[in-house]
Image (cartoon, rainbow, N blue to C red):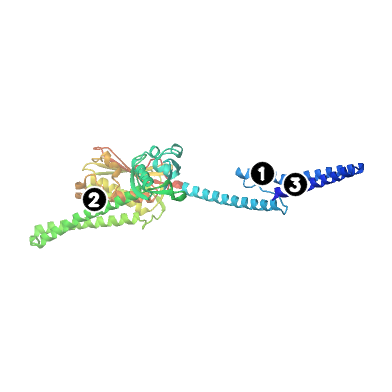
Amino acid sequence: MIAIRLTLGFLMILGAAVLTLGFVIYFSLPYGIAVAALVFVISMILAILLVQRVTHPLDEFTRVVQQLAGGNWSVRLNHRDQDELGEVALYLNSFSDKVRGTLAALEESKSRLETIVANMESGVLLVNSDGQVVLFNPAAEEILGVADKNILGKSQVEALHNYSLSSLITEVFAEGEVRCAEISLFYPQERILEVTAAPVLGERSKKSGVVVVLYDITETRGLERMRAEFMANVSHELKTPVTSIKGFAETLLDGALYNHRSAEEFVNIINDEANRLSRLVNDILELSRIEFQEVKPQLMPLDLTLRIKEIVDVMEPRFLKKGLSLKAIVPSHPVIVSADAHMIHQSVENLLDNSLKYTPEGGQVTITLLSEPEEAVVIVEDDGNGVPEEDLDRVFERFYRVDKTRSRKLGGTGLGLAIVKHIVSAHGGRVWAESELGRGSSFYISLPTGEKIGGSGRHGDKE
């Protein structure tokens, strides 16, 4: 329409000029020649102005469209005339604003999605239709032990180094269905992963990739195993004294009750087993209360120097009765920690009781208190048989015994050291053991002091 108007205007002006010129030639008047020349010049000027009026906006349109094609959606057309070009400019500006708004919304959504994926605890990776890894979040880096710069753009088989995971992705590509599996990793550390892989659909439901989510369930499986082991151990530990009590009671009922010597022996055994059963139940309840935080430490300033002296005074007769020497080495000044006095008393007493049981007659047990800038360390040392190196990391586990038969004969429940560990952990401290087979053992309790209460000390965690 614009081109038609331009052409018609130009032809009309040009026709007027030609008509005027014809009249002048026809009448052959000098004055008419001058008028005709003037009309012709004016007509040409008007024609040029008309052409420029139309071509300038077209040039502007071309420039703006080129910028829009280059991705600059902020550029606008300023043509304000109420003609066809004005309408086109209005529509083009409106279209540009909508596209710019849509792109801004997409960019915001992309930023939110990237933030969510980057901060997820679960690992996320995306494999495109060519089998290349194109997305790999920090959690996946930590779980699989590889950096995204070393994996992005590589094929999933080459990048992941895990046959089970690669096979799962290949299966989802082939079948186009969601798949779940439990996969074990052995590098960079042993882990158990719950993996969910799902196809990513593009245009016309065509498979364009596979998204994989990795859940680290190592701790969950470990807790489940510990729970199962705990229930099995509790059942076994309860069964032993109950069986003894039941057996000797039945023997008494079968006639031994009337044999005074046998009856007295059996009743003493029943009493001992009942006491052992009571200690076991009490220790289980105590451990459960501490683990589930039903009993929280009542933190108060506690002088460990004074407390250790009191514990030694109370327990020394038991050591002397067994032919053992109990020695305390403590600073001359108070060593103050923020702790629950009853819980710390129980922990130290349990360590001393452990040494009392496993140190042979004639041996020596020493309890030492070290005061350091950021922690107080209690050490209980004995010169007993010691603990094999392979058992050191497990001595604080529930029901774990180095010599199970001997432990039961000595009346142990197998929970004393586990209670120590949980009490000290509740105070922000640490426990560990050192031993040399045949040369005794040393058990350590480290408690934070001053501003470092609840923090870590100088030693690594050797539980």
Q: Secondary structure at mark 1?
A: helix
Mark 1 → mark 2, Cα distance in angstroms:
93 Å
**SS for dot 3:** helix
Mark 3, other Cα within 10 Å: few <14 / some 14–19 / many ≥20: few
Q: CA distance from mark 3 to mark 2?
A: 105 Å
Q: Is residue 368 among what the camera can see? A: no
Q: Which residue is mark 3?
A: 53
Amino acid type of the residue tagged 3 in the rendering: Arg
Residue 291 lies, in percent from the top left, at: 34, 54
| CB within 8 Å, label 1 to label 2 | no
Q: Residue at x 86, y 46 (%)?
A: 23
Asked which secondary structure carries label 2, the reply is loop
- Label 2, on which residue? 412
Residue 312 x/y as whole percent: 30, 48
Quarter holding residue 185: top left
Q: Residues within 10 Å of mark 1 (few under 14, many from 20)?
A: few
Point out residue 175 in the picture as x, y percentages from the top left corner. Answer: 36, 48
Residue sitting nearer the eye, 212 or 209: 209
Q: Is residue 100 left or right of residue 158?
A: right
Query: Which is more N-terminal, label 2 or label 1?
Result: 1
Q: Which comes sooner in the sequence, label 3 or label 2?
A: 3
Instruction: Pick the residue in front: 56 or 342.
Output: 56
Q: Which residue is mark 1?
A: 62
